[in-house]
Image (cartoon, helix red, strand yellow):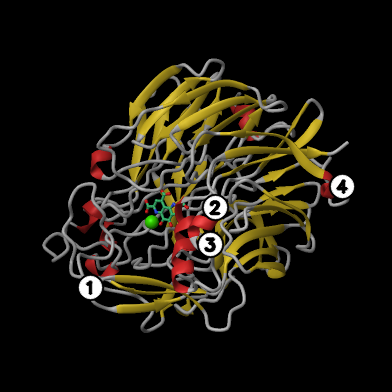
Amino acid sequence: MTNEMLVKPADADWPMYRRTYNGWGHSPLKQITTENVAKLKPAWMMSTGYSEGHEAPPTVVNGIMFTATAGNQILAIKADTGEILWRYKRELPADMLGSHPTNRGVALLGDKVFWMSRDSVLVALDAKSGAEAWTVPVQDYRQGYYANLAPLIVEDKVVVGTSGGERGIRGYIVAFDTETGKETWRTFIVPEPGQPGSETWPQPGDEHADAWKTGGGSSWITGQYDPESKLIYWGTGNGGPWMGDQRPGDNLYLTSVVALAADTGEIKGHFQYHPNDSFDWDEVAAPILVDLKRDGNSVPGLVHASRSGVLWMLERTDDGPIKFIKGTPYVHETWIKSMDPQTGRVEYNEGTKPGTGVVGEFCPSFWGGKDWPPIAYNPDLNYVFIPANENMCTTMQGGSVIDYRAGASYTLGTQGNRSDLYIVDGADHIGEVQAWDLNTGEKVWTHTFESQNWGPLLSTAGGLVFGGGTNDSKFHAYDAKTGDVLWEMKLNSGVIGVPSSFEAGGKQYVAVQAGWGIDAASMQTRLSAAYPDRFKPSATVPTGGVIWVFELAE
Ligand SMILES: O=C(O)c1cc(C(=O)O)c2c(n1)C(=O)C(=O)c1cc(C(=O)O)[nH]c1-2
Ligand SMILES: [Ca+2]
């Protein structure tokens, strides 16, 4: 695997988290089409040996699949037959805390596989044998740092972020040399006093002067990269603690996209989706890199379907600054009082923002119009596809001011806190897959599900969109033009894995991991408690990780 192959992957391959640096999640393969997708059937499947959420894409290069699973494991598999080539597992320390026991995949360069272990250790393996080349501790897991994202390769560096936004961390994005594992740069999402952006945090001498030390800003989804401008685009997480009034100010660079110079990590541009986060609205899902229309001209753009429920269109520039173009709600929202037409800055509606002892009522819910599952983009149609959760809201109240304790939960407060989830009165569905036409900026179709939808999306040149995400464990193929479901199959478990497509031996395959868990399952638990007649208990969604690979029947 070379840098050139990452910049322009072979049609047959899926060499990184979203296949390409622009984050499209689109395969140019077109043997499987709207005409024949009804003939899709399993080619092989394989139990991973673990339960919990399976979220990683099956990454495939030259017919070899590398993927990560729950259980802190990596598998190398012959992609056409399912034969295991090697298996790597890493024991976690006994005193490891941390939540979200999943993993979102590996990165590849040269003869190595790169992967983040949950205890915040970056691991480089020999791709042929699975033997360790080197490991480096990235941050101290005892302080609440943990990791589950797929690394990003940028030239000779491997770049990763962190989880821990609910545990009083100070988030960062960090780069290591792919050969030696030596750290090249580390950029904190929350600036320290004196650094650019620190003016948006409480100042020395203020009541909350130390807020930046535990301010959150996790970075738990892989960013994108523009090889021409050499800028990395990374989404950033919620504030810590959750209640924004305990860290007055906008709090850059929380809940933003940041543009980082690949060689130094310096923040060259940013756009903050909502200031002074108080909703657990991590905006970690990285925006896709795509051209957009601005005043009739085509400009390099960024598109992000935010957890706050807005489809954002932004302009990127070669030297970094990110400019606002447009923000359009894609689900029912109640929090936006106004959006500045020049800057995109949002003012909050009265009563929507929770605080310490203050109730906030807001839609979408704290899980967002969409949480982490990635959007996809079809360049032939110029459509963006969004896996959305519509009609969901939250009532939230922060408790008394929370004492920081290293590694412990650091969210709402110590007492009197609540965060309830409810469905808008009269709403008949939650889950959606939406398609938006970037030529017009309009939504062109919506497919709805009674169930929530936590299904990452895959687009293919065969005119298809694939995704699971529903609580009936089905994996669906949609017609990219119309949203009609052309094929679906009930798998062993709910599907929250990122689907991929690849070619081996001249044949196109579609691959995905089934394995329900993490927040899709928590949402099911909450919904079934609140709406027992509409949502069966969480236990009725089967669990257990299986890699599924599909092909066309002869
Ligand atoms: O703030 C954080 O550091 C952090 C980390 C993670 C994670 O590591 O997966 C999630 C969240 N927050 C979060 O807010 C959230 O809704 C969530 C859902 C999931 C998932 O895998 O389904 N992870 C996370
Ligand atoms: Ca979070």
Measured Cα–Cα span from mark 1 to mark 3: 28 Å
Measured Cα–Cα span from mark 4 to mark 1: 56 Å
Q: Nearer the viewer, mark 3 or mark 4?
A: 4
Q: Nearer the viewer, mark 2 or mark 3?
A: 3
Q: Residues within 10 Å of mark 4 (few under 14, many from 20)?
A: some
Measured Cα–Cα span from mark 2 to mark 3: 27 Å
Image location of residue 159, percent across then percent down: 44, 36
Q: Which residue position is annotated with label 3?
A: 370
What residue is at 34 percent from the left and 36 percent from the top?
Answer: 119
Q: Which residue position is annotated with label 2?
A: 317
Q: Nearer the viewer, mark 1 or mark 3?
A: 1
The disc, 2 or 3, on the residue closer to the chain's N-terminal end is 2
The disc, 4 or 1, on the residue closer to the chain's N-terminal end is 4
Pointers 1 and 3 in contact (C-beta within 8 Å): no
User: Which secondary structure lies at badge 4?
Assistant: loop
Pointers 2 and 3 in contact (C-beta within 8 Å): no
Image location of residue 49, percent across then percent down: 51, 33
For the N terminus, which image quadrant?
top right
Q: Which residue position is annotated with label 4?
A: 36
User: Which secondary structure lies at badge 3?
Assistant: loop
